[in-house]
Amino acid sequence: MITRDLKIGRRSFVIGSAAAGAGLALGLKIPFGAGVVRAQDGSPEINAWIVVRPDDTVVIRIARSEMGQGTLTGLAQMAAEELECDWSKVTTEYPTPGQSVARKRVWGNFSTGGSRGIRESNEYVRKGGASARVMLVQAAADGWKVPASECSAANSVITHKPTGRTTTYGKVAEAAAKLTPPADVPLKDPKEWKIIGKSVKRLDTIDKVTGAQVYGADLKLPGMLNATIKECPVFGGKVKSFEADKIKSMPGVRHVVKVGETAVAVVADTWWQAKTALDALPIAWDEGPNAKVTSASIAETLKSGLDADQAFVRTQVGDVKAAIAGAAKKVEAVYAYPFLNHAPMEPMNATAKYTADKCEVWVPTQNGEAAFAATLAASGLPAEKCEVYKINLGGGFGRRGAFHDYVTQAVLIAKQVPGTPVKLLWTREEDMVQGRYHPVMQAKLTGGLDASGNLVGLHLRLSGQSILAAVFPQNLQDGRDNATFQGLDPSGDFTLGYTVPNLLIDHAMRNTHVPPGFWRGVNINQNAIFLECFMDELAKAAGQDALEFRRKLMTKHPKHLAVLNAVADRAGWGKPAPQGVHRGLAHMMAFGSYVAACAEVSVTGDKVKVRRIVCATDPGHAVNPAQIERQIAGSFVYGLSAVFMEECTVKDGRIEQTNFNSFDSMRIAQMPKVESIIMPSGGFWGGVGEPTICVAAPAVLNAYFNATGKRIRTFPLKNHGIQMV
Amino acid sequence: MARLTINGKSSEVNVDPNTPLLWALREQVGLTGTKYGCGVALCGACTVHLDGRAVRSCVTPVSTAVGKQITTIEGLAANGVLHKVQKAWVDNEVPQCGYCQAGMIMAVAALLKDKPKPTDADIDGSITNICRCGTFQQVREAIHAAAKA
């Protein structure tokens, strides 16, 4: 066998894996002419997804990132299902973006966001497993000189049915790796699934309870220095000057460097030394044109869009103006949703090593390829001289997907210290003020009811920030940001669950200098509050039960209705609640899944106790129900933390909140009991990590109204003196 | 320079005595299981034990820890056997991203030492760690499971 090292080189992997402990041991050789691709330990690659070791261990390659949502385990279930391997012998590894580029993106998309990790890659990952199974079975059949059709595979064992002879995957892997992959392989009918749909245990738990798991912030490389950074706190501002001499003699300080035009970093022996020195560094900022912006001025800008003539129309059915003008009753309400920081527990970080011949980056990222692109751009080196190694993430929630500003910074610092690896770790304070924030949005909703209380017209006007305009302007459609309408769409993964005879949904785009980002759930967070709270307002105006009022509008949306009915039934909607307990409903379709919630709250003065939330989700296929339950409960913590206690406000052009004292987060005492109804109806693949986040807040707000008669339309609730207990 | 007793072993750390214990553990001793989350004792990701009591190491100066028994997540298992809290965490599949879990586990281990059978109110009153993934439902179940073990 003649093999040669892949361009990216074996040595770099050895450095990476030795430094980072487990999880980076991937080394690949590609064949020189015909031959077998081998993993670093010499085991044959059956195909890009599957490596089988002689001891029958199966290594499944995972291109998407694991950031807590269970994606890694779910994708391994996909491949293992079709491979027919012994689940107890499955292990996983991340291919690197550099390898992916060198192999013509054989692993497809690395992006782990938009609840796409499993739903968008399930088919080709399953085919990877199926193709490998066919080759392993063929290799066994060849060895026995029998037709492959007489052989079957289960639990990593291949059996020749007529004679009962058996062999294992590990024994035939070498031969299988030499075979030509089948052109196409049929996939199993979901009814035959044995691993998909089972609550198998996550593959990545043990190291997380012993302290052994290495996150980006924990990385240590030989000779590494540590850095921390301050970027101009006013977005759009620059560094004017800094007095490096004042801190150069402080303990451990090695370098004080400007990073691009906007930031200053201290590089020191230890991070604590770097942080201590940076705190003492006098920096003057050129704050630029946004230094006077405040939350109030931003709110005024958004308010101007609520009645503006110009707006991007997403849905227009019938004649809304005429319908509302002719309605027996008109209902109007204005809502507003604030900026939010992602605040993952692990602050942003990246480690970079730069020489003129090579730039390597170690980074916790939701998108290895985007991190790779940032590395190329910042280093100025071509793809074959760059590599990115994905390290475990201490939370992502969207902050580590589309944005790799910390990678750019780390490379720009490393270029000023060539040959020395530098780990850049932000302080929590930097993380809070240099976010990519959940966009601000206001909404004016106007509804018309006829004399019988039927909704005859609805106008939902959004006014606020477009994420796409700031981040992916190429994805705008004639200037319109369709992502703004998530959950309100006429069709697709975010379909509105109501049929209204006269309907207008439009968006007056009002952008701000505060950079927006994709924040777990993205625009469904506010859209679900706007729509589902207003539906309760309409039902109240119509004198109708909130559930019955919705049901009349949902006859053409059976899957939406099914999840709503499921939570109503389980929670006992329509039946008396326990003394002092009040209920509220909400539902939505998002990221391809149908979700609904019924919340139960009790209110004592200004104190709100969310006692219980029943949640239903129909994600089409439920790959690992136990993990879906955890995503439901977890998404509720993220969503309810926001609606009760979180906002990022702007003063003098900068974000005011700098730590968890001013940007709080739920604790265990505030956790409601969450009951999950997982009701996959089959035939489609919906997301799991995000959809349910959006129904907790409106269900709780509707329950709060039912308890108090007070309708809250601006957030967070703490601004109204309301406390979550 | 200070001498610390960490997980039963004596270690010399070459830091200013005001340096937070967190950074001495992570950067001098190489014990990175203890995490930096906020730096101001709000989130609990840095929780370790000093003489068996849970403290937030990000605001505990090294000088305070001298002469005390320091236990970190790496020292919680004894003789290769997981602590009952770690075991309950595995059995109940508590961690999501896992970053806050070392601190959460250390806080819970200290709670169970004080109150072997904590009520939900005990848990609510003493476990104040932040988890942005939102694992609290599983945390509570695992605490009760550990208490029964």
Image: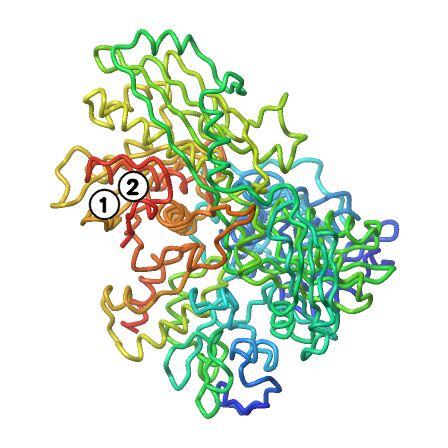
Q: Circles 2 and 1: CB distance less than 8 Å?
A: yes
Q: Is B29 positioned to the left or the right of A372 in the image?
A: left
Instruction: Please indicate, yes or no, whether residue A1 appears anywhere in the rendered image.
Output: no
Q: Position of residue A630 (x, y in %)?
A: 40, 52
> Mark 2 sits on what residue?
A700
Label 2 and label 1: CA atoms lie apart by 7 Å
Locate residue A579: give its quadrant.
top left
Locate residue B26: give its quadrant.
bottom right
The disc labelled 2 sits on which kind of residue? Val
Q: Position of residue A133 (x, y in %)?
A: 63, 47
Where disc 1 sits, the SS reads: strand
Q: Quadrant of the C terminus of chain A?
A: bottom left
Q: Position of residue A574 (x, y in %)?
A: 17, 33
Whether residue A415 is situated above or below residue B10 in the rendered picture: above
Q: Nearer the N terminus, badge 2 or badge 1?
A: 1
- Pick the front one: A456 or A432: A432
The disc labelled 1 sits on which kind of residue? Val
- Pick the front one: A697 or A38: A697
> Mark 1 sits on what residue?
A601
Q: Give the chain letter at badge 2.
A: A
Q: Residue at x 34, y 65 (%)?
A: B142
Q: Residues within 10 Å of mark 2 (few under 14, many from 20)?
A: many
Q: Position of residue B123 (x, y in %)?
A: 28, 67
Q: Give the chain letter at badge 1.
A: A
Whether residue A626 is situated above or below residue A186 in the rendered picture: below
Whether residue A507 is situated above or below residue A237 in the rendered picture: above
Q: Residues within 10 Å of mark 1 (few under 14, many from 20)?
A: many
